[in-house]
Amino acid sequence: MKRIWFSIIFLALAVSLCFFEQIKVHKEFHIAIDTADKAIAAESREEKTEYCKQLEKEWEHIHNWAAMTTDHSILHGTEIAVAEAVEFSKSEYTDETDEALIEAKSELQQIHDGTLIRVENIF
């Protein structure tokens, strides 16, 4: 009887950990994707730079969580895109900044979609 209770408690902990991870991933990635959208829509260079810096901070926070569950080569592409957006935002190259932000948004969306618990991700 003790084994059954141990199994039930272990399964409950595993399921609650999965729910917590899914809620955290969903929330954090949507915040970062919204920040990238705001940066793309920003008109002034200063505003675009601020949004890019905010996106970089959000990415660093996400990276700590995603590094535990996601392939590092996928995370590396996003890290490069976010760093490019920050560097281009400091210069006069607004077109390149927007391209890097679009790339970063696409990478973030790809990682988000890959970490969701869905039938196609399981099989």
Image: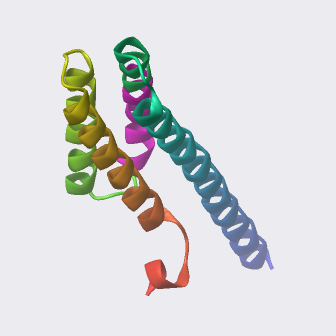
Vertical arrangement, residue 13 with respect to residue 84, above or below = below
How is the protein colored in the picture? rainbow
Left or right of residue 16: residue 66: left
Q: Which residue: 71% across, 76% down? A: 3
Q: State the image quarter where residue 110 is shown.
A: bottom left
Can residue 61 be seen in this snapshot? no
Task: Tell which residue pokes out farthest to the top in this image.
Answer: 46
Vertical position of residue 100 compared to residue 121: above or below: above
Q: Is residue 52 magenta?
A: no
Q: Main secondary structure of the magenta part?
A: helix
Q: Residue at x 67, y 59 (%)?
A: 19
Give the magenta part as a residue range: 53-67
- Image quadrant for the N terminus? bottom right
In the rendered view, would you say 103 is above or below 82? below
Of 62 and 46, the residue lying toward us? 46
List x then y, in percent, for residue 35: 50, 34
Residue 69 position in % (x across, y down) = 40, 56
Q: Is residue 37 left or right of residue 9?
A: left
User: For residue 10, which quarter of the picture?
Assistant: bottom right
Inspect this view and state whether residue 1 appears: yes
Task: Identify which residue is drawn at 19% across, 16% down.
Answer: 91
Indicate the quadrant containing the C terminus: top left, top right, bottom left or bottom right: bottom left
Of 58 and 12, nearer the camera is 58
Image location of residue 39, percent across then percent down? 43, 30
Residue 95 at x, y = what percent?
23, 34
Residue 16 sits in quarter: bottom right
For residue 113, side relative to residue 4 (left or right): left
Residue nearest the observer in this picture, 12 or 106: 106
Residue reaching furthest bottom? 123
- The residue at the point 55 percent across, 77 percent down is 118
